[in-house]
Amino acid sequence: MIDPYFQEKNFTLYLGNSLEILDQMEIPQIDLIYVDPPYFLSNDGITCQSGKMVSVNKGDWDKSKGFIEDVDFIDSWLKACKKVLKDDGTIWISGTLHNIYKVGYLLEQNDYDIINDIVWFKPNAPPNLSCRYFTHSHEIVLWARKSKKSLHTFNYERMKTWNNPKDKLKNKDKQMRSTWSIPLIPKDEKEFGKHPTQKPLELLNRIITSSSNEGELVLDPFCGSGTTGIVCSILNRQFIGIDSNKEYLDLAIKRFKDEKKRSLLYSTKKDEQIMKYL
């Protein structure tokens, strides 16, 4: 196994190709995997950002290489993730129409068992400048277990009583539904910079809280600026993140170290600590 790029207590980052690093990991050891893969939407189009027209391109890593190569790439990381996932482990995968239907098909082809498709609704999504189709205002997050025999973790009671002061959703002892209204990342989550596909802390808070327990090991094979790891640190999970971009990993480290400083100021009551940060 290659040496970590950064490691402090239960927060570990690797710099390099995800498939190559996953191939070197001991198997199986992961309780929960969150994947925010390339969506293949960098097609030289335009979008709206802060009221301005900007390129939709995120980088070469997000460009489609054609249907067959895109499918082969998704299939390869799904297989690599399954090798390191424990028998009762689960995987969450984010996507849009550009990739999520390929992901769903390949999950079933690789004998995963899909549990839920979550609709992440973005109430503050940017407008559609072309006016040629409906405004994109949601993403799909697929949740699947390793197999139909997996005894997957679902913290049902915790999600029934979800009550985050910064989140308009207050379940009041009702079942949490599969549509989650969560705004795009707020300004204070961009303090040290921003990854072009960065996810809000609240999205990962729900994912990790609902489907893992304290002390368990969470993997993010395309971790970017480390949002998954930051939430794991707050929720007392172990974390392994992999990314091929040094700049984004350096951003993740800054965010992690800042979170560690902030945690010293919080109440010793765990729920209060989590909610004050999230």
Image (tube, rainbow, N blue to C red):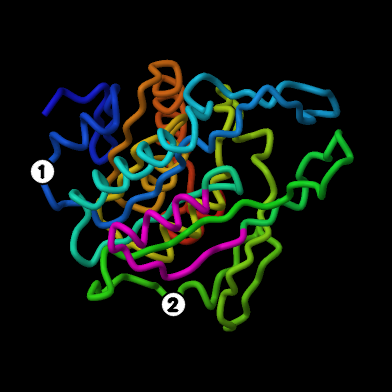
Q: Quadrant of residue 19?
A: top left
Residue 75 spot, x, y in % from top left: 33, 45
Q: Is residue 228 magenta?
A: no
Residue topped by disc 2: 156
Residue topped by disc 1: 26
Residue 71 spot, x, y in % from top left: 41, 41
Residue 50 can be seen, yes or no: yes
Q: Secondary structure at mark 2?
A: helix
Q: Is residue 176 above or below residue 80?
A: below
Q: Quadrant of residue 13?
A: top left
Q: Residue at x 33, y 59 (%)?
A: 109
Q: Amino acid at mark 1?
A: Glu
Specify the farthest residue to the right: 131
Q: Amino acid at mark 2?
A: Tyr
Q: Residue at x 68, y 56 (%)?
A: 121
Instruction: Report the Cα–Cα distance between label 1 and label 2.
Output: 30 Å
Q: Is residue 115 magenta?
A: yes
Residue 195 spot, x, y in % from top left: 55, 27
Q: Residue at x 31, y 63 (%)?
A: 112
Q: Which residues are magenta?
A: 100-119
Q: Nearer the viewer, residue 243 or 215?
A: 243
